[in-house]
Image (cartoon, rainbow, N blue to C red):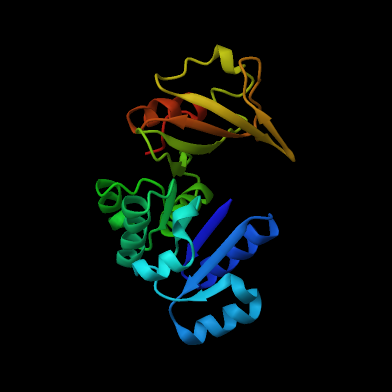
Amino acid sequence: MYVIVVGGGKVGYYLTKALLDAGHEVVLIERNPKRFELLEEAFGEVAVLGDGCDVRTMLSVGVKRADVVAAVTGDDEDNLVICQLARQRFSVPRVIARINNPKNEEIFRLLGIHETVSSTRVLYHLIEEELGAEQLMPLSTLRRGNLTLFEVKISEGSPAAGKAVSALNLPPDTLLVAVLRGEQALVASGSTVLLGGDTVIALSTPDHVHALQELLVGAARS
Protein backbone atom coordinates (compact mmCIF):
# COMPACT_ATOMS: atom_id res chain seq x y z
CA MET A 1 0.00 0.00 0.00
CA TYR A 2 0.91 3.64 -0.38
CA VAL A 3 0.12 5.42 2.88
CA ILE A 4 0.33 9.13 3.62
CA VAL A 5 0.71 9.90 7.32
CA VAL A 6 0.08 13.51 8.34
CA GLY A 7 1.51 14.57 11.69
CA GLY A 8 5.01 13.76 12.83
CA GLY A 9 4.48 13.54 16.58
CA LYS A 10 5.01 10.32 18.50
CA VAL A 11 1.93 8.69 16.97
CA GLY A 12 2.96 9.60 13.44
CA TYR A 13 6.57 8.61 14.06
CA TYR A 14 5.81 5.11 15.34
CA LEU A 15 3.02 4.54 12.81
CA THR A 16 5.42 5.43 9.99
CA LYS A 17 8.11 3.17 11.40
CA ALA A 18 5.68 0.25 11.70
CA LEU A 19 4.40 0.72 8.16
CA LEU A 20 7.91 0.89 6.74
CA ASP A 21 8.94 -2.20 8.68
CA ALA A 22 5.94 -3.99 7.13
CA GLY A 23 7.16 -3.09 3.64
CA HIS A 24 4.65 -0.40 2.73
CA GLU A 25 5.42 2.78 0.81
CA VAL A 26 4.99 5.71 3.19
CA VAL A 27 5.26 9.49 3.24
CA LEU A 28 5.20 11.37 6.55
CA ILE A 29 4.15 15.03 6.39
CA GLU A 30 5.14 17.41 9.19
CA ARG A 31 4.75 21.19 9.13
CA ASN A 32 6.94 22.11 12.11
CA PRO A 33 10.48 22.72 10.75
CA LYS A 34 12.26 21.70 13.95
CA ARG A 35 10.28 18.50 14.27
CA PHE A 36 10.79 17.84 10.57
CA GLU A 37 14.57 17.93 10.99
CA LEU A 38 14.35 15.06 13.50
CA LEU A 39 12.03 13.09 11.24
CA GLU A 40 14.24 13.64 8.22
CA GLU A 41 17.20 12.35 10.20
CA ALA A 42 15.23 9.24 11.13
CA PHE A 43 13.41 8.55 7.87
CA GLY A 44 15.27 10.43 5.14
CA GLU A 45 13.17 11.21 2.07
CA VAL A 46 10.11 9.59 3.61
CA ALA A 47 9.68 12.76 5.71
CA VAL A 48 8.26 15.80 3.92
CA LEU A 49 8.03 19.35 5.25
CA GLY A 50 4.57 20.73 4.56
CA ASP A 51 0.98 21.24 5.66
CA GLY A 52 -1.38 18.31 5.14
CA CYS A 53 -4.30 20.75 5.00
CA ASP A 54 -2.78 22.34 1.90
CA VAL A 55 -3.78 21.02 -1.53
CA ARG A 56 -0.36 21.72 -3.02
CA THR A 57 1.41 19.74 -0.33
CA MET A 58 -0.89 16.76 -0.81
CA LEU A 59 -0.46 16.88 -4.59
CA SER A 60 3.32 17.04 -4.21
CA VAL A 61 3.35 13.71 -2.34
CA GLY A 62 1.08 11.98 -4.83
CA VAL A 63 -2.18 11.90 -2.91
CA LYS A 64 -4.08 10.84 -6.05
CA ARG A 65 -2.48 7.40 -5.93
CA ALA A 66 -2.62 6.97 -2.14
CA ASP A 67 -4.42 3.94 -0.74
CA VAL A 68 -4.69 5.41 2.76
CA VAL A 69 -4.39 8.84 4.35
CA ALA A 70 -3.96 8.80 8.15
CA ALA A 71 -4.35 12.19 9.86
CA VAL A 72 -2.73 11.86 13.28
CA THR A 73 -1.86 15.42 14.26
CA GLY A 74 -2.61 16.75 17.73
CA ASP A 75 -5.32 19.04 16.33
CA ASP A 76 -8.76 17.55 15.67
CA GLU A 77 -9.77 20.36 13.31
CA ASP A 78 -6.68 19.76 11.17
CA ASN A 79 -7.33 16.03 11.12
CA LEU A 80 -10.89 16.63 9.96
CA VAL A 81 -9.79 18.98 7.17
CA ILE A 82 -7.06 16.57 6.02
CA CYS A 83 -9.48 13.64 5.85
CA GLN A 84 -12.19 15.59 4.06
CA LEU A 85 -9.64 16.92 1.57
CA ALA A 86 -8.31 13.43 0.89
CA ARG A 87 -11.72 11.81 0.59
CA GLN A 88 -13.79 14.47 -1.18
CA ARG A 89 -11.26 16.16 -3.44
CA PHE A 90 -8.88 13.30 -4.21
CA SER A 91 -11.14 10.26 -3.65
CA VAL A 92 -8.62 8.43 -1.47
CA PRO A 93 -10.16 4.99 -0.80
CA ARG A 94 -9.52 5.04 2.94
CA VAL A 95 -9.05 7.90 5.38
CA ILE A 96 -8.39 7.49 9.11
CA ALA A 97 -8.46 10.28 11.68
CA ARG A 98 -6.97 10.50 15.14
CA ILE A 99 -9.38 12.15 17.55
CA ASN A 100 -7.89 13.80 20.61
CA ASN A 101 -11.16 14.95 22.19
CA PRO A 102 -13.77 12.12 22.30
CA LYS A 103 -16.55 14.73 22.12
CA ASN A 104 -15.56 15.37 18.52
CA GLU A 105 -16.24 11.80 17.38
CA GLU A 106 -19.85 12.50 16.47
CA ILE A 107 -18.85 15.58 14.46
CA PHE A 108 -16.41 13.52 12.42
CA ARG A 109 -19.06 10.89 11.73
CA LEU A 110 -21.67 13.47 10.73
CA LEU A 111 -19.18 14.91 8.26
CA GLY A 112 -18.52 11.52 6.73
CA ILE A 113 -15.29 10.51 8.48
CA HIS A 114 -16.27 7.12 9.92
CA GLU A 115 -12.86 5.57 10.65
CA THR A 116 -11.54 7.29 13.74
CA VAL A 117 -9.18 6.38 16.55
CA SER A 118 -9.58 7.96 19.97
CA SER A 119 -6.75 7.03 22.33
CA THR A 120 -8.67 8.65 25.18
CA ARG A 121 -11.67 6.39 24.62
CA VAL A 122 -9.50 3.28 24.26
CA LEU A 123 -7.67 4.09 27.51
CA TYR A 124 -11.00 4.73 29.23
CA HIS A 125 -12.24 1.29 28.21
CA LEU A 126 -8.99 -0.32 29.33
CA ILE A 127 -9.26 1.34 32.73
CA GLU A 128 -12.87 0.20 33.12
CA GLU A 129 -11.85 -3.31 32.12
CA GLU A 130 -9.07 -3.30 34.74
CA LEU A 131 -11.56 -2.15 37.37
CA GLY A 132 -13.80 -5.07 36.48
CA ALA A 133 -16.46 -3.39 34.33
CA GLU A 134 -16.75 -6.10 31.68
CA GLN A 135 -17.98 -4.69 28.40
CA LEU A 136 -17.34 -4.68 24.69
CA MET A 137 -14.41 -2.54 23.62
CA PRO A 138 -14.96 -0.80 20.26
CA LEU A 139 -11.93 -1.18 18.00
CA SER A 140 -13.02 0.44 14.74
CA THR A 141 -16.11 1.60 12.87
CA LEU A 142 -16.36 0.55 9.25
CA ARG A 143 -16.45 3.20 6.56
CA ARG A 144 -19.80 2.09 5.17
CA GLY A 145 -22.88 1.09 7.06
CA ASN A 146 -23.34 1.13 10.80
CA LEU A 147 -21.05 -1.73 11.78
CA THR A 148 -18.47 -1.61 14.56
CA LEU A 149 -15.69 -4.07 15.34
CA PHE A 150 -15.58 -5.02 19.02
CA GLU A 151 -13.20 -6.93 21.28
CA VAL A 152 -14.39 -8.76 24.35
CA LYS A 153 -12.70 -11.04 26.89
CA ILE A 154 -14.48 -14.28 27.74
CA SER A 155 -14.19 -15.14 31.43
CA GLU A 156 -14.51 -18.59 32.98
CA GLY A 157 -17.96 -17.64 34.24
CA SER A 158 -19.17 -16.19 30.96
CA PRO A 159 -22.51 -17.59 29.70
CA ALA A 160 -20.75 -18.23 26.37
CA ALA A 161 -17.81 -20.17 27.84
CA GLY A 162 -17.82 -23.81 26.75
CA LYS A 163 -20.35 -23.21 23.95
CA ALA A 164 -19.87 -23.56 20.21
CA VAL A 165 -20.52 -20.44 18.13
CA SER A 166 -23.37 -22.25 16.36
CA ALA A 167 -25.11 -22.76 19.71
CA LEU A 168 -25.11 -19.05 20.53
CA ASN A 169 -28.23 -17.07 19.80
CA LEU A 170 -26.42 -14.14 18.23
CA PRO A 171 -28.34 -10.87 17.79
CA PRO A 172 -29.28 -9.79 14.25
CA ASP A 173 -26.53 -8.20 12.12
CA THR A 174 -23.86 -9.73 14.36
CA LEU A 175 -20.93 -11.94 13.44
CA LEU A 176 -18.12 -13.46 15.50
CA VAL A 177 -15.05 -12.88 13.32
CA ALA A 178 -12.09 -14.32 15.22
CA VAL A 179 -11.01 -15.87 18.50
CA LEU A 180 -7.63 -15.00 20.04
CA ARG A 181 -6.40 -17.86 22.22
CA GLY A 182 -2.92 -17.59 23.66
CA GLU A 183 -0.57 -17.10 20.71
CA GLN A 184 -3.19 -18.35 18.23
CA ALA A 185 -5.66 -16.35 16.16
CA LEU A 186 -8.56 -18.54 14.98
CA VAL A 187 -11.16 -17.66 12.37
CA ALA A 188 -14.48 -18.17 14.13
CA SER A 189 -16.74 -20.85 12.63
CA GLY A 190 -19.89 -22.55 13.82
CA SER A 191 -17.88 -25.36 15.39
CA THR A 192 -15.51 -23.05 17.31
CA VAL A 193 -15.97 -23.56 21.06
CA LEU A 194 -15.38 -20.46 23.18
CA LEU A 195 -13.21 -20.95 26.25
CA GLY A 196 -12.56 -18.89 29.35
CA GLY A 197 -9.59 -16.63 28.63
CA ASP A 198 -10.41 -16.26 24.93
CA THR A 199 -10.63 -12.84 23.37
CA VAL A 200 -13.40 -12.61 20.79
CA ILE A 201 -13.48 -10.16 17.89
CA ALA A 202 -17.09 -9.45 16.90
CA LEU A 203 -18.82 -7.35 14.26
CA SER A 204 -22.16 -5.81 15.19
CA THR A 205 -24.32 -2.68 15.14
CA PRO A 206 -24.76 -0.24 18.05
CA ASP A 207 -28.40 -1.34 18.41
CA HIS A 208 -27.32 -4.85 19.36
CA VAL A 209 -24.32 -4.12 21.59
CA HIS A 210 -26.16 -4.72 24.86
CA ALA A 211 -27.62 -8.03 23.66
CA LEU A 212 -24.20 -9.17 22.46
CA GLN A 213 -22.61 -8.18 25.77
CA GLU A 214 -25.18 -10.15 27.77
CA LEU A 215 -24.59 -13.15 25.53
CA LEU A 216 -20.81 -13.12 25.80
CA VAL A 217 -20.06 -11.75 29.26
CA GLY A 218 -23.39 -11.53 31.07
CA ALA A 219 -25.39 -8.52 32.18
CA ALA A 220 -23.41 -5.31 32.72
CA ARG A 221 -22.53 -4.56 36.31
CA SER A 222 -24.39 -1.76 38.00
Residue that sits furthest to the top in the current view: 167
Residue drawn at 65 percent across, 15 percent down: 191
Q: Is residue 201 left or right of residue 211?
A: right
* Image quarter of residue 54: bottom left
Residue drawn at 57 percent across, 69 percent down: 13
Nearer the observer, 70 or 26:
26
Residue drawn at 64 percent across, 76 percent down: 44
Rendering coords of residue 207 (x, y %): 32, 29
Rendering coords of residue 136 (x, y %): 46, 38
Residue drawn at 38 percent across, 56 percent down: 86
Q: Is residue 175 left or right of residue 83?
A: right
Q: Quadrant of the C terminus?
A: top left
Vertical side of 150 occupied by 66: above or below: below
Vertical side of 31 occupied by 169: above or below: above
Rendering coords of residue 125 (x, y %): 46, 50
Numbered circles on residues, count? 0
Residue that sits furthest to the bottom in the current view: 34
Vertical side of 4 occupied by 33: above or below: below
Residue that sits furthest to the right in the current view: 183
Q: Can residue 89 be seen?
A: yes
Rendering coords of residue 68 (x, y %): 49, 52
* Image quarter of residue 15: bottom right
Q: Can residue 74 be seen?
A: no
